[in-house]
Amino acid sequence: MAHKQDPNEKVVYVGDSRIRKRDRAPAYPPDFSAYPGKSEAFIPNFLLKEWMVGVVVLVGFLVLVISEPAPLGYPADPLNGSFIPIPDWYFLFLYQLLKYPYTSGSYVGFGVVAMSGLPFIALLLAPFLDSGKERRFYRRPIASSLMLLSLVAASYLTWVSWNHYQHELAINKVTPEHIEREEKAREAREKGLPRPVPGKEKIPAMVAADDPAFKTMQEAQCIACHGTELEGGGAPALRGVGDKLSKQEIHDTILNGRGGMPPFKGQLTEEQINSISTWLEKQKAGAE
């Protein structure tokens, strides 16, 4: 059965065939770069890119932390009058800024609140104050000028603070703790001695280290808190404990616990506790 064709209908053919072209959207996703002022889809395009960048940065940061562990200094000594306090490098510019007369003394409130707090508040308000669509820095003179001024000021203050610190060390003839620790470790290594533990050089030597009681303490995991050589760690050192506690006090501490130490009643026999307390009572300074 023939269909009647409208003579005014415009027919568009594909190639040499007689198949009419259909007006429909393409099957592929649109290219967002073709739309000025638009962006790509947040999920999954943008999110996947940001996630990959975050993974790379995180892995790099973890490698840096593992390869260069943070150095540990000596225990704080409140009687050390030669110690020169200094913050970490990323706070040196604020440390130096708070030394100036208009940010200290009678103006300390202004220095702490205004000079330190306002830059952070400005960063929080920046997205709302600078809401223009232009992203080229030379087309944003105010924001670019403030950024460059902040970078120059932070770099200059950091440099001044570090040079002032070095000058104070030279005047007071003070060797920084980490350098002193490295020198002692190098001297011990050259003499074939074990590396010294900072702040624990005055701990008395262990008495009768081959006593079976020490092996019993190792099996009871006492060294997990008191150190592998009883030099202390998460718990006080047991070297020299005989100068502080009697045998009965040591026995009662092991049996019933003390402070954060758990009781070993039921875990160790009375004979084991007695041998440990007898051996620890011998741990005195100068004893052999």
Image (spheres, helix red, strand yellow):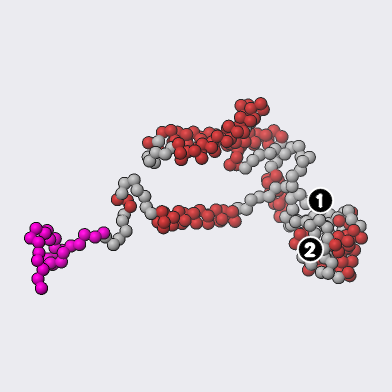
Give me the residue at 78% from left, 59% from top.
226
N-term-proximal mark, 1 vs 2:
1
Q: Amino acid at mark 2?
A: Cys
Pointer 1 local density, CA inside 10 Å: few below 14, some 14–19, many at least 20: few
Q: Which residues are magenta?
A: 1-25
> Is residue 8 covered in magenta?
yes
- The x, y position of residue 27, in whole percent, is 28, 62
| Residue 172, above or below 61 | above
Left or right of 247 in this view: 227: left
Give me the residue at 70% from left, 51% from top.
186
> Is residue 95 covered in magenta?
no
Q: Secondary structure at mark 1?
A: loop
The answer to whether residue 213 shows anywhere in this view is no
Q: Which mark is drawn over residue 222?
A: 2
Q: Nearer the viewer, residue 283 or 6?
A: 6
- The x, y position of residue 194, in whole percent, is 74, 57
Q: Amino acid at mark 1?
A: Lys
Left or right of 75 in this view: 86: left
Please tell me in which quadrant of the rendered image residue 275 appears.
bottom right
Q: Which mark is drawn over residue 247?
A: none
- The x, y position of residue 70, in whole percent, is 64, 51
Give me the residue at 50% from left, 56% from top.
55
Q: Which mark is drawn over residue 202?
A: 1
Q: Secondary structure at mark 2?
A: loop
